[in-house]
Image (spheres, coloured by chain):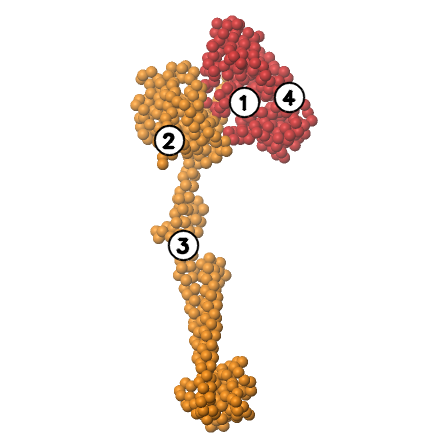
Amino acid sequence: MAAARTAGIAYNDAMKILVIEDDREAANYLEKAFTEAGHTAHVAGDGETGFALADSGDYDVMVVDRMMPRRDGLSVIAALRSRGNTTPVLILSALGEVDDRVTGLRAGGDDYLTKPYAFSELLARVEVLNRRASAKESETVYRVGDLELDRLSHSVRRAGREITLQPREFRLLEYLMRHAGQVVTRTMLLENVWDYHFDPQTNVIDVHVSRLRGKIEKGFDAPILHTIRGAGYMLRGD
Amino acid sequence: MALSVPAIMRTTAARLSALYLLLFALCAILLVFYMTSLSSRMLTAQTQETINDEVLGLARAYQRGGLPTLVRVVEQRSRQPGANLYLIADTNGQILTGNVRSLEPGVLETDGWTTRPFSYQRYGEGEADRQRGVASAPAATGHNAIAVVLRLPNQMIMLVGRDLGEPERFRAVVSRALMLAVGMMGLGGLLIWFFVGRAALKRIDGVSEASRRIMGGDLTGRLPVTGAGDEFDRLSENLNTMLARIAMLNEGLKQVSDNIAHDLKTPLTRLRNRAEATLAGNHKVADYRAALEGTIAESDHLIKTFNAILMISRLEAGYSSEHTTRVDLAAAVRDVVELYEPVAEEAGVALEADAGTTCMVDGNRELIGQALSNIVDNAIKYSQDATAKPAVRVALARGGGRIRLTVTDNGQGIPDATDRERATERFVRLEKSRSQPGSGLGLSLAKAVMKFHGGQLDLAPADPGLSVTMDFPDKEDRPK
């Protein structure tokens, strides 16, 4: 995965990531993998240490394991939030039920990932979380290369030419454009565009993306929606 | 059954018998005590009334003819059988006439009612003692009486009284009856314990014995039911139902672990073999990469299967969600059909939906979406071997207190009813579906989701094809 990135995709801005995870092997793996991806990662082995580090350090994103000795992840997050710390948090958990996800997000988490996970999925989500701080939520028009999406008039143009999209295709493109330059995984698309959190038996998302790709790339010179092998998709105009 | 006394007292039956015995005895004693005191008060009052009548009669005789007439009347009455006590004495207490030969000293010294019963002797009694020269001791005769002492106008003393023998005999009878009653109750308590308590004890012992056997590992064992339909039978029947349920769950668990062992072991073995084969040969870097990618894909599939198993188990174990909301099934149909529409088109399957307007149920959107997408996914896969143009139709219908969400394909279907039944079982993949990708958990998950929503999953032949119905209870249209 990391190889795929070094093999062509430009890094996002380097992040300073705090990993609070009690499983030493998993924590070391994450530290190594984040470093390979061009980021800086610090590891805390339990909730107490994690809280102290998060409270003093200036991190871009935190990855917090839910079940830990001394202090569980949710209480760490809740304590940080009550102290005014708004650093985006991704919760890692072995619990994957709908209810557990909701509990985690209610406690102040920004995203939730169930173990076991693919590192590519974790990395993509962490990068999106980092960008969320400087979100494009307020912008009404998204521009990526010669592609333009107007959120108010629901119109899409590329190189000045109007492109007609179905409502769901519009939302799909909107999400991809909001996270342009970032890897977006299939699960992220299913969660954010369809609001479903399960794994469909067939990879339905790929077909939706390729249909969208047909509409925004067919008849134009350059590809703009790229498939990142083993990870997901990226919208990038260069 | 040789039980020591403390052991007997440890049994509920014996303790209850003892308690009842004690309570009965206490009640009996209280009752008898109350009855005797009440009746003796009544008898005393009656005695006093009789004496008052006598005094009134004698007073009239005295008024009529003075002392001589009084004496005559007294002598006359004294001779009657069962007569009251009469006595006339001079001022010194010397008995002049009447039927009392002697009485406790001091009785004649105070006028009015005697304060307590006194002892006396009548004429014709104690003669034998006197003849033997034994000093007459009035107290020893055992006759007790109460009386009224009056002073006549000429200062002579008159006593009118009545023997207390009757009330005392009554009291004796009652106390004998009391002793008898307490004794009988004791015996009764023992009998109750012996027959009722021991019978109950024996049956409880039977239940304990059977449960020990079951705890010992014999899960097929059941508690004895006598057929009497009493509390013990009901208890045993309930426990037997519980045991049957436990056995069923246990069987399910065993089946699942067997299936897990099979369905997870197979890909794990494949994974291991692939890694081993890659290590053994002398490969190029690209081969290693391919092997590793294959490994990741295989483990992803394993994780998916494992997640599905966990979810089904949690749903079947009665997992309760606080995140149950009002879900619009029509919207769920639109979402899932929209999600699968490109896949269907790519596979050359016509996917159409007839969902109408809103149709609300209480449920979990996520679970319903997952179940429906599993069913639609299957339908698209299996409609591809249709003889006509492959088509999948999703329809939502409401009526008769039910909401039916039906997915129909026009493929080969599952003609055999037993096979249809088996299709929703965990890990069951019917022979012809083995070539299709999938974990064999899709329909099982849908079935568990329907059970969670208080509904059911029905499979029916659609001629051609198969129709799978998610059958929800309609809370807004309950048949009255």
Residue at the image position 54 percent from the left and 27 percent from the top: A114
- Do tag 4 and tag 1 residues touch (Cβ < 8 Å)? no
| Mark carried by residue A48 | none
Q: Secondary structure at mark 3?
A: helix
Residue at the image position 40 percent from the left and 54 percent from the top: B203
- Left or right position of B287 against B352: right
Evaluate whether residue A227 shows in this view.
Answer: no
Q: Secondary structure at mark 4?
A: loop
Q: Secondary structure at mark 2?
A: strand
* Residue B365 place in picture, x, y as percent: 46, 27
| Mark carried by residue A60 | 4
Q: Mark 4, mark 1: which one is toward the viewer?
A: 4
Q: Chain of mark 1?
A: A
| Mark carried by residue B402 | 2
Q: For the N terminus of chain B, which image quadrant? A: bottom left
Q: Amino acid at mark 3?
A: Arg
Q: What crowding class fits label 4: few (fewer than 14 Cα within 10 Å), some (14-19), or many (20 or more)?
A: many
Q: Amino acid at mark 2?
A: Arg
Q: Earlier in the sequence, mark 4 or mark 1?
A: 4
Relative to residue B15, is residue B211 depicted above or below?
Answer: above
Relative to residue B78, is residue B467 depicted above or below?
Answer: above
Q: Chain of mark 3?
A: B
Q: Mark 1, mark 3: which one is toward the viewer?
A: 3
Q: Give the red chain's letter.
A: A
Q: Amino acid at mark 4?
A: Asp
| Mark carried by residue B203 | 3
Q: Amino acid at mark 1?
A: Ala
Q: How far is the residue under mark 3 from the one under mark 4?
A: 71 Å
Q: Secondary structure at mark 1?
A: loop
**Residue under disc 2 on the same chain as residue under disc 1:** no
Q: Nearer the viewer, residue B299 or B473?
A: B473
Residue labelled with disc 1 = A118
